[in-house]
Image (cartoon, helix red, strand yellow):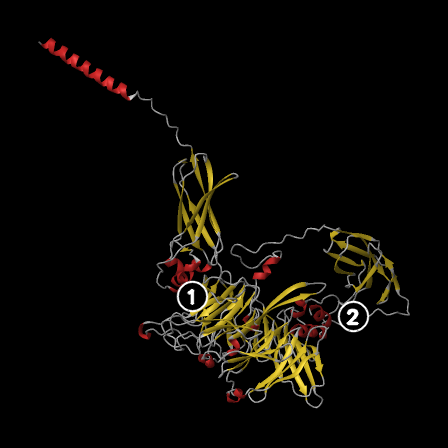
Amino acid sequence: MMAMLMILSFAASMIAVPNAAAQTKTPTWPFVDALPNPAGVGQPVLINWGLLNYIPGSNLNDGFNITMQITYPNGKVENHTGKTWSTGNLGKKIAFSEPGNYTLQTVYDGEIYGGRHYLPSQSENVTLQIIDGYWKADHPGHTLPDEYWTRPVDSQLREWYTIMGSWFATPNNLYAPWNAAPESAHILWSMPIGDTQGGMAGGDNYQVGAQAGDAYEGKFVGSIILNGVLFYNRERSGTSAVQTIVAVDLHTGKTLWERNYDFGGSRVSRGQTLTFMNQNNRGTFSYIWMASGTNMWALSPTTGNLVYNMTNVPAGAGSAAGGGPTYYGPSGEMLRYTATYTTSNGTLRIQQWNSTYLVEQAYMKAGLDTGTSGQWGAQVNNPGLGTGNAATLLAANGVTAGTARSYNGNFGYDKTWYITGLTANPGGILHVFPDDRIILGSFSVTNGVYLTGVSMDSENAGFPLFTNRHFAAPEAWKELETGSNMQSGWVAFSNNPYVAILWTKESRINYAFSLENGRFMYETEPQNFADGWTDSPSGEKMIAYGKLYEASVGGIVYCYNATTGKLIWSREITDKYNESYHREAWWLIPVAISDGKIYIGHMAHSAQEPKPRGAPFFALDCETGETVWMIDGAFRQTRWGGRGLMGDSMIVTMDTYDQQIYAIGKGPSAMTATAPNFAITTGTTALISGTVMDVSPGTQTDKVQLRFSNGVPAVSDESMSEWMLYVYKQFERPMSTTGVEVTVFAQQGDRVIDIGTTVSNANGRYSIDWTPPADATGKWDIYAYFSGSAGYYGSFAQTEMAVSAAPEVVPPEPLPPYGLYILGAAIAIIITVIIVGLLNYKKK
């Protein structure tokens, strides 16, 4: 797809044709190279071949037609012919299944290009050794981060792409891959949404809180996450011409920029990261897109500056199951589709509009694609681009509004398919899976369901997979209210497995249809009566991991087998205080599915005041339905505004209780350690102590530091939800909070003594006793280590401690035997009597 976009975007290549006139004869210098060499059996080998020549004044499609010959050890000859870039080279990866010496040679037959006759030539032979049991070492790569990380991420850390998801727009089925989704309610930071004071007014206003935007004035609508940055519309939705966009670093919680735009009431609607490759420049280009009507404006994510804009963008047709009418191609190009049926000849025309092709066509029409300047940055930033009948391309680089140039032509439609021989109108476009298939159809309570599928893969594009497959309306459908958008219709589409879900509101039944053959598959049992009140079923049902998940007004989460319709598990989330007026359960709304977990919150059509307390936000295991974590009263969602979204392995959401934006994810921790600062002797017990603290961005704010002057303690995953309510929501301090596990050891050179494991308390402090053994004299490094948890990355601290030998104990002289003591005493008594007698005699 990417290569095709590039090829279609430039002028046709110069074809090598014989020229009767005299041409300049140009010698050629062929080459061939293999990397690695030697290589192992089955190891991919990159073979580069071509000419050291280049084609002067060439366009991107110019190149030499040249062959690389491989002679196998058994003598077999294999030819690989291809067209080089204008620089004269091309390459291909090949894996060889047999050991031995392979001979590589480039053979060029010669060509004529633009007055030059490039002469035939052959390269020297190169021997490629393939050795059984040998494997040229691959780069070892890098491990995923085990500590808090930020953007930008060095391009060499390739493995990290798996945790760096973006949220360009509400994704199909709310499925958000490329995230290590949060396994704890740990809050990283919070900030005011900024368009109103938040929380309860109090005083004369009693318990009424700030308006949340429901209904019809929703906030946070259209929010996106693009490469680690949250972009949201600060003002509520409405008709105001001036809108404010706020850019916030997800990892720090800091506002990067905030700007006002007067684009006819347009707002942020989606993001884009376009991968563009050509011979000159390769990489990604990212944009924030604002939209109003058929106009779209591309802004720089780093500055908010206008880059270029488009007008008369076709409306297209999109899915009712989320994602809107705009789809993304494999390179990030924005795609829209239109379908036109001609009754007279039974022909269906499907057109694909491509935002990348639009820009490239305008660039070409302006005559700006000369030489080797075919680079995306040069296209969208070129001051020569301007307005046209089908597109207005206004580059911010040196172009003033009203001075742009005009071009004729219907730009942007890069593909058209015709399906003939249809006997009836296949209906409108229901959903598109780019480069896979497009689904058309209709639904009514009288005529039932009609479905048509058309292939869009590269080999079978335009081939009808099934046409006007009919499912007769059940008798019960005649009683349904489907007029005036009464919330019955198509609600979910998936290509893994190929299933579409049709919801009938009053009967609360899901009907499943195969997108492989268009046939009816199953219907589910009727759901709870309250689910019939739903007014947004397309945002409540999604398919992932081969399962159909639902959560709605009834307060029950359902998980069905998406292929059979069998109920696998269900969870009812009750309101134990009955403050919500929908049953005894919370009105639920799914937020995202990622990393094997489904995230769900509470919302209502119009928020009651005072708002019901304790609204749940929770994560369930997609396979079992078991609770991964739950927090009550933290992140109440909004019906008319934007729900939570996910990117860079974090959830970011607005909370209607206090009009704050919260980021949830794994945060950093910090430790201290102290030991006696004087030498102790072996055999003496020493106390080693310290702290384990939460140092997430939110803990560094004035509001938190005023309450936690000694820092915010890190707590156990079991205590996290109530602790976060205490720290960020000012709820009562929980009395059962526990800390984290700390391991302490002593090290002296290569010798390590395991001192033991302890647990910090609710104040973040830990301590442990150590009695050094007799042979443990000298200076010791003491390490305290927290290995991390679902809520925190790990950390460690070091201190030192001196241990001296205990003083030598001198044993006393041995005492005489017991009998000698008695004899000595008797003799002493006799001597005393004699002395006393002599003294008395002298007196006399």
Nearer to the camera, 288 or 821: 821
Return the mark for residue 13: 2
Residue 485 sits above or below residue 585 on the image:
below
Across the whole image, how many numbered discs are drawn on residues?
2
Residue 225 sits above or below residue 325 on the image:
above
Name the amino acid type tagged 1. Answer: Ile
Q: Looking at the image, can residue 701 be seen?
A: no
Nearer to the camera, 741 or 446: 446
Q: Looking at the image, can residue 275 be seen?
A: yes
Q: Where does the image place residue 560, in percent across and percent down from the top left? A: 53, 73
Judge from the rendering whether residue 29 lies leftward or rightward of residue 400; answer left or right.
right
Name the amino acid type tagged 2. Answer: Ser
- Density class for disc 1 (Cα within 10 Å; few <14, some 14-19, many ≥20) is many
Q: Earlier in the sequence, mark 1 or mark 2?
A: 2
Q: Secondary structure at mark 2?
A: loop
Occupied quadrant, residue 613: bottom left
If the image is split into quadrants, where does the N terminus sit? Answer: bottom right
Residue that appears at 59% across and 88% down: 447
Q: Where does the image place residue 492, in percent across and percent down from the top left? A: 56, 76
- Residue reaching furthest left? 844
Nearer to the camera, 167 or 19: 167
Please say if the residues under marks 1 and 2 sit with CB atoms less than 8 Å apart: no
Q: Secondary structure at mark 1?
A: strand
- Residue reaching furthest front? 819
Residue that appears at 50% across and 85% down: 486
Q: Where does the image place residue 429, in percent across and percent down from the top left? A: 62, 81
Residue 128 sits above or below residue 540 on the image:
above
Q: Where does the image place residue 776, in percent across and percent down from the top left? A: 45, 36
- Density class for disc 2 (Cα within 10 Å; few <14, some 14-19, many ≥20) is few
If the image is split into quadrants, where does the C terminus sit? Answer: top left
The residue carrying mark 1 is: 631
Residue that appears at 38% across and 54% down: 763
